[in-house]
Amino acid sequence: MKVFTFSEARQQFSAVLDCAQTEGSVRVTRRDGRVFVIQPLDSTLAMASSPLDVEGVDLGVSGDELVEFIRESRRQ
């Protein structure tokens, strides 16, 4: 695993990401001793759908009927 100092990683961030892509992960160390690992995200996780992306429910109502329901509810 390639190791970069924080300063090197900041100055050459594109190279750090390229290295992580080819080697699997890169370690970044700070002066205070903290260590971080940068690794590429699995493409299947990156393409995961939103938890708010849910299938619709067929209510048997046309678009025009739905618009009319909404308009009627706003009149009251």
Image: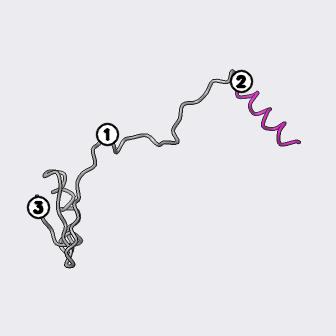
Q: Residues within 10 Å of mark 1 (few under 14, many from 20)?
A: few
Hey, which quadrant is residue 64 in on the image?
top right
Tell me the residue at 69%/21% (across/down): 60
Instruction: Point out the residue furthest to the top here.
Output: 60
Q: Is residue 71 magenta?
A: yes
Q: Residues within 10 Å of mark 2 (few under 14, many from 20)?
A: few
Q: Which residue is mark 2?
A: 61
Q: Classify mark 3: helix, strand or loop.
A: strand
x, y percent for residue 56: 58, 30
Q: Which residue is mark 1?
A: 44
Instruction: Point out the residue furthest to the front here.
Output: 33
* Amino acid identity at mark 2: Val
* Amino acid identity at mark 1: Thr
Tell me the residue at 43%/40% (across/down): 49
Say which of marks 3 and 2 sits in front: 3
x, y percent for residue 42: 27, 44
Hey, which quadrant is residue 31 in on the image?
bottom left
Here the colouring is: one colour
| Segment tinted magenta in the rendering | 62-76
Q: Classify mark 1: helix, strand or loop.
A: helix
Of residues 29 and 68, the one drawn nearer to the viewer in this rendering = 29
Looking at the rendered structure, which numbered label has been put on residue 2? 3
Screen quadrant of the C terminus: top right
Query: Is the Cβ of the residue at disc 3 closer than 8 Å to that at disc 2?
Result: no
Tell me the residue at 22%/54% (across/down): 39
